[in-house]
Image: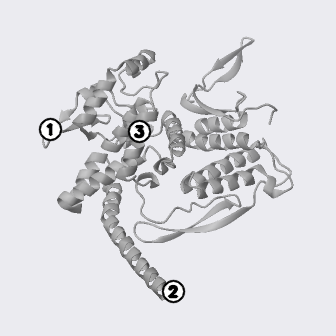
Amino acid sequence: MPEGRQTVSRQEYIRYTPQRASVIGGKVIWRQPEGSPIVDGLPQIFWADGLPWREANLWLMLQATQARKDIATIKSKSASIYAYSKWLEEAEVDWRDFPTRESDRCLVKYRGYLIKSRKANLIAPSTTSQRMRVVIQFYRWLRHTSLLSPEWPMWRESFINIKRSNEFGLERTFTVNTTSLSIPNKSTVGEKLEDGLFPVSEHDRAKILEIAQSLAPREIHLMLMVGFFTGMRIQTIASLAIQTLENAVEDPATPELYRLAVGPGASPPVSTKNDVTGHVWITKSLLDELIVYCYSADRLLRQAKAKPENRDLVFITRRGNPYADRNKDRSPAINVSMSTLRKIGRKHGISALKVFKFHQTRCTFATELARLAVKAGGAIHAIGIVKDALLHRDESTTIKYIKFIERTPIKISMANDFTKAFLGVTNESDNVL
């Protein structure tokens, strides 16, 4: 790597228009080829010194133009390559480094780093496997196009058989190509809720909100409140409009509960996963607090910097941008804020913030709602209530929450019985001694 390079690379998104050069009348004319679509939001990766990673950017461009992958897939692949580029700079490793000693090769080192991060619960098992898989795909392309031809092999190839059963119980065997660098997705055993995350306890939720209110920007505290007490995803929270709040309808069952219309069918439209249109519950106190914030001096300053189409958004960054891309359930701005909040939590000894992720607010709300619904009307009625409140497309995700709630008392009882038995055995041993 060039001397003096900083340690932080970056990722940007561009509007890419394919162009082809032709000579007409002695002049070079650039034109967009017929049938070549414009790619909006094509990711590009830059090193910390500002230079583009040309090979990676070319691969991503070809994924869009030749392989015709959808932009969401390309952004997912780019996220893995971007994570790799950050590691390369932090570890001061060259991406073309394949020396004689296998353990010193860049991909072997990166594999070790990913496995270590997985063991430390810094990244999920699925993310670990995904990042390594995409990096291998990129290097396969580099080798195929002769953009990289190291003297020593990058990995060892092998074939394995994988058995899969279809919906009728018939088993089929697939032969797939794998490498010595592949990382199996070793997920943790046990119940999993949405995105493999778990809810936080009521005590931890209070601690998180307390520290956010004291030491985080007001917008982050409010978004955490919305997540914890409505269950909305970040893409929905980020696309809430002032009019959405003002159009809230009082729930017929209780004056302390309101309903917000969300989805593409709402007016104004609010982004939801899978374009589901429906209503989410929000308490009157939280709704009132959000409306007061909408007309606060802090937010109006942000609104003044925003583009006309973004000025009605409830939450706007300091630079006047939306917190998340529309129709994308991820937010770089929120990720940065959560990273900062986790650092604050570590500094103040709040264990709940060690590995906290924003999506856990949704898990926490759904779990609490499921507990109350099961207690009030049983599991059958609870499924419908939770499904509607969380805007689940089907019941399979909802049922995970119901099962989680139903098993919790059993696990608590088992833990109590085990503790009593263990203490009993310990006391008897003490008496003997």
Q: Residue 204, position in %: x, y?
A: 40, 50
Number of callouts in the render?
3
Which sits in the foreground, 24 or 69?
69
Position of 184 with respect to 257 (left or right) is: right
* Residue in the picture at 85% in, 51% down: 99
Which residue extends farthest left?
252
Mark with earlier residue (2, 1) = 1
Q: Residue 371, position in %: x, y?
A: 27, 57
Q: Whole-Å distance between the Cαs marked 3 and 1? A: 27 Å
Residue located beneath label 2 in the image: 433
Which residue extends farthest bottom?
432
Q: Whole-Å distance between the Cαs marked 2 and 3? A: 58 Å
Three-letter code for the amino acid on which mark 3 is drawn = Ile
Cβ atoms at labels 3 and 1 below 8 Å apart: no
Mark with earlier residue (3, 1) = 3
Three-letter code for the amino acid on which mark 1 is drawn = Pro
**Quick one: SS at disc 3?**
helix
Quadrant in which the N terminus appears? top right
Q: Is residue 331 visible?
A: yes
Position of 276 with respect to 21 (left or right) is: left
Within 10 Å of the Cα at label 2, are there few (<14), some (14-19), or many (20+) other Cα atoms?
few
Q: Is residue 394 visible?
A: no
Q: Is residue 222 above or below residue 391?
A: above
Residue located beneath label 3 in the image: 234
Residue located beneath label 1 in the image: 255
* Residue in the picture at 31% in, 61% down: 405
Cβ atoms at labels 2 and 3 below 8 Å apart: no
Q: Nearer the viewer, mark 2 or mark 1?
A: 2
Q: Residue 406, position in %: x, y?
A: 30, 65
